[in-house]
Image (tube, rainbow, N blue to C red):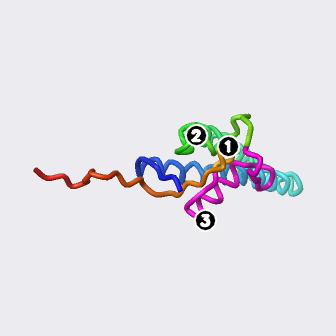
Amino acid sequence: MHRFHSRSTILRFRFAAYLLFLKFLLPVVALGVLTCGLLANDTGIMVIALGLGVLALLVGILQYLLATRSRCPLCLTPVLMNKGCSKHRNARTVLGSHSLRVALAVTFRDSFNCPYCHESSVMEVRHRPGYQENHRD
């Protein structure tokens, strides 16, 4: 099991995973609200759908920015975005997405298998021998 260098890296992973869920969910919700607005011929509901669509775009941009810095501690490949690189032969998907599988694992198991090197990483800070956080002279 590989571990991360700092607590901020783990928080970035978790936040990017939540944004990835929203990136998949918001367009579906916006399309459903838009359909309801069109069927009811209500412009207020259609404006809400437009707002959800814009929010989905903003979430996608923010998720992309965070996902580029959420890297596997071993191979240093961003695991919460599709780089187009070759995946490991045993890498699995959820709904056709390797990134979504990593996000689900980070959220619910506190560990994930990298789709590129297939090594497991746990969402913990690496212990450094000889390093004391409350160093006093």
Q: Which residue is mark 3?
A: 108
Picture residue at 53% right of the left edge, 38% below the top: 69
Q: CA distance from mark 3 to mark 2?
A: 23 Å
Mark 2 vs mark 1: which is more N-terminal? Answer: 2
Is 137 left or right of 6, judged from the image as shown? left
Picture residue at 81% right of the left edge, 55% below the top: 32
Secondary structure of residue under mark 3:
helix
Q: Position of residue 19 (x, y in %)?
A: 61, 50
Q: Which residue is mark 2?
A: 75
Q: Amino acid at mark 3?
A: Phe
Most extreme residue toward the front is 129
Picture residue at 63% right of the left edge, 44% below the top: 79
Q: Position of residue 111 (x, y in %)?
A: 57, 59
Q: CA distance from mark 2 to mark 1?
A: 8 Å
Query: CB atoms at circles 3 and 2 under 8 Å apart?
Result: no
Q: Amino acid at mark 1?
A: Tyr
Span colored in magenta? 88-113
Q: Residues within 10 Å of mark 1 (few under 14, many from 20)?
A: many
Q: Which mark is residue 116?
A: 1
In terms of depth relative to the viewer, which is nearer, 28 or 44?
28
Q: CA distance from mark 3 to mark 1?
A: 21 Å
Q: Position of residue 83 (x, y in %)?
A: 69, 35
Mark 3 vs mark 1: which is more N-terminal? Answer: 3
